[in-house]
Every structure is written in structure tokens, then in C-alpha cells.
Amino acid sequence: MDPALKNRLLSDIKATASTFSPQLRLAAKYVADNQADFGLDPIRETARKAGVSTFTLVRLARLLGFDRFDDLREPFRHALVSRTAATEDREWLDHWRTTDANGPYTAEAAANSLAVVERSLQRQTPEKLHATVQMLLSARTVYLTAMRASYGLAYHFHYVGRMALQSMELVPRHMSTAIDDLNDAGPEDVLMAITFTPYSLETIEAAAFAKSKGAKLIMVTDSEIMAPGLEADMTLLVSSISTHHFACNSGAMAVLEILLALIVDEGGADVHARIADYEALRRNHSAYWSAPKKQ
């Protein structure tokens, strides 16, 4: 089997999903976002997880050029790899599973976090990460936005990143909306938006507004199939699967940390000097706690 077939299918799904009916679009999004499960599960289980009928899955297969559902699933089954070797054979995880009644679930959550980080990093390439950083470094203004649970990711990225990149602004500011703060954005600017399923309406609207102003758009998200018609200039896909109701942010944080490291590395001497100035300022104004000196 052609190993590139799965990637071509994903490209076809991304390119055509906006033209599908709501149910077909829901099925297509599930396939793109849950490739491992799709490669393993039978059609009824896939239909249950995706929230569509088995007939919808068969229709999707035919729209993508296959006679049967199994023919659509086969490239994903063929490409399937183990969840992650990094979480196997870890003695401390085995110990956690046997500590008490909550041990097995605690170990599962820990293994999931490790797997999410690895899957998120595997979905990147050095070339894409470098290109993203160059977009940020060359922008007149870097706007950064996220809402609700994702806001913590954006806040951390802004807090650290602004020491190296003075053009970075976290929006919305104060009591405004992100769109208010993006009104002056233009072709020389970049908006970096962070959102995961279910996608924040405010974040998607801000991303669309920035594009309408001519700004470049970087999305950190869990799927390329979000809002029909919204085309990012750069999409950094991360895994956000969790053992609880909300998204697991450990993978997104790992990718953001690499971007921060590259900003510092590729920013040159000016960036290093700016960071040193910040550190000196904080120490001079006693920003950090230290043990009192003994008399």
C-alpha cells in the first residue's frame, strides 16, 4: 500500500470538507482528528464516537473515491503505530497503578499526558517551526489571542515571549474584545490564535477578522477542519486528547516552549541583551524572594 495515501486523503478531506453537508463534515472532521481510533474501530464504533450514522460514513467513503468504508479505513490502519513507545516499560507508571484504588486511573492520565506531548511534537517539523518563528520575528506586531482554558497557554507564551519580542501583544486588552484590538492590524502583522475543540467563537471570529485586515494567521489547534472558509497561513496541529472532559494542554505547551526557545535562539544578540535587561531590572527591584541574610 502506498504509504502516502493517508496523507493525500487527509489533504482531500481538508480541501473539500467545507462543501459537505453538516453530518458529512462532522464525519470528515472526526476522521482527520482521530486517525488512530479511525484506523482501529469498526464502523459502528466510529459512527458512535463521531455522532453520525453508519450510512454517513459509507457516503463519506464514496465521496472520497472508495467503494466501501473498509477501503477508506485501510490506509489509516496501515499507517497506525503504537500509541507511544515513550510511555511503555516505565517502572514508575507500573508502580503508580498498584499504589491504591485510584492508581490505575492516575497512571492512565500520566501516560496520556506523555503520549500527547510526543504526538504533538511528532506532528511538527523543524522547517515548519523555523518558518513560524520567522513569521513572528519579522512581524510589525504579533497579536496573540486565546480564550477560556487556552488563555493560560497564551498568557505564558506572551509573558516569556515579550521579553524577547517586544512587538508581541496579548489581546483582548483590559475589557475590550480581540476584534477591537485588531482594528489596526494589517499585512505587516501576525495574529497567533490558540483554540481547541469545542472552538471558541471569539477566537475564530478574531482569526477571521485578522485575515480580513490582511494580517497573517498562525493557528495552534487540534484540527485543520475548524471553521469553513478560515485559512491559516500556518497551522501547528497538536494532540489534545485527555482522560477527562477538557482538552489536555501538555502537547500544546510543549510546542509553544519550542517556539519560545527558537525565538530566543534565532533572535540574535539583541534578544539576549533584552532578556538580560529584564532579569537585571527584576533583581534590582527585588522581584524574586531570597532567604534573609544571617546577622
Image (cartoon, rainbow, N blue to C red):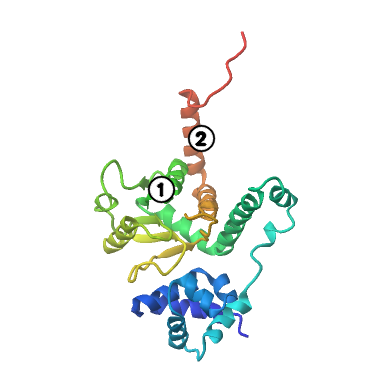
Kindly identify the amino acid type of the residue bearing the numbered disc 2.
Answer: Ala
Determine the image quadrant of residue 35: bottom right
Mark toward the start of the polypeptide (1 vs 2)? 1
Vertical arrangement, residue 150 with respect to residue 217, above or below: above
The residue identified by callout 2 is 276
161 horizontally vs 214: left or right: right
Q: Are marks 1 and 2 in contact (CB under 8 Å)?
A: no
Residue 112 point in image, percent of width and height: 60, 56
Kindly identify the amino acid type of the residue bearing the numbered disc 1.
Answer: Tyr
Quadrant placement of the C terminus: top right
Q: Residue at x 47, y 28 (%)?
A: 282
Residue 176 point in image, percent of width and height: 25, 45
Q: Kindly state the secondary structure of the residue where label 1 is placed.
A: helix
Q: Residue at x 28, y 57 (%)?
A: 186
Residue 104 point in image, percent of width and height: 66, 52
User: Is label 1 or label 2 in front?
Assistant: 1
**Measured Cα–Cα span from mark 1 to mark 2:** 27 Å
